[in-house]
Amino acid sequence: MIHTRSSTDALAQRADVISPGTGIRHWGTVFFGPRSSAARAPGPQATMSDLNPGESILPHFHGVSMFQLFVDGSGTIGNRGQELKALTIQFKDHHTAYGPIVAGPNGLSFVALRIFTGNSEPVYLDKPGYRERLRPSKRRNVTSDPVIFSVDPVMEHREQAQWETLLEDPADGMRAQVVRLGAGMAVQGPDPRAAGGYYVFVGKGSMHHDGQDLPKWSMVAVENEETGFEIRAGAKGLEALVLEYPRGDLD
């Protein structure tokens, strides 16, 4: 299936949530799937978290692979304090620990994108029994350099599509790219069957799909039984992330 979610609709339902790791109240938005990562439901799951200044997400892992996009604010990740700036892409394999994530002085917003059905409940390393829940995995935990988006007139008047690869593993099809399109331009997205399906995430401008214009931070999830997907820019152009999942990476 192809799943579409406008950020306008999703963010209108932003709500207070309690962090399962620390019990701190922050803000959460559901784009796809259940709010609870412990719940099983068919189709993709995508949620946004908005952290308070200085708030931490404790080290943990999930049972499904995911892309994570740090879209606003600032912070650090990992024990060495790798700096996070908007817009940084992280990919991590299932059963691969990461963190802590610490929000900067003005907060930090990130989007967790999962495409496979499965239990994505966080398993925290400070809790007993976490080792028994580990499973074999490539243990990749990689981040991109921050994506720099074009200024408005450059984006709108771009005459040729431009693709840039940010993260890639040809062995199983994992890949993160940015595609840059001028006003009204269209390109064919990757073959969803070549990997494990993918997300198209609007980083700047808008994407036109199925009769609607999808603004910044909107997303489309293309599951891997689809035969293709057209990425079409809106009236002012589009710069989008295309995030492909590993082949056969089911929970």
Image (tube, grey):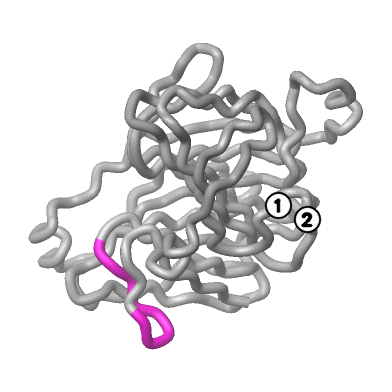
* Residue located at (70% from left, 52% from top): 36
Q: Amino acid at mark 1?
A: Ser
Q: Secondary structure at mark 1?
A: loop
* Residue located at (65% from left, 51% from top): 246
Asked whether the beta carbons under mark 2 and mark 1 sit within 8 Å of each other, the answer is: yes
In the picture, measured across the screen, residue 217 lies left or right of residue 173, that is left
In the picture, measured across the screen, residue 99 lies left or right of residue 188, that is right
* In the image, residue 64 lies in the stretch drawn in magenta: no
Q: Position of residue 123 (x, y in %)?
A: 76, 33
Residue 18 sits above or below residue 222 on the image:
above
Q: Quadrant of residue 242?
A: bottom left
Q: Which residues are magenta?
A: 205-212
Q: Quadrant of residue 46?
A: bottom right
Indicate which disc residue 39 carries. 2
Instruction: Tell which of 60 and 9 is nearer to you.
Output: 9
Please give the residue where the numbered disc 1 appears in the rendered image.
Answer: 36
Indicate which disc residue 113 carries. none
For the residues marked 2 and 1, what is the alpha-carbon distance in whole angstroms?
6 Å
Q: Amino acid at mark 2?
A: Ala
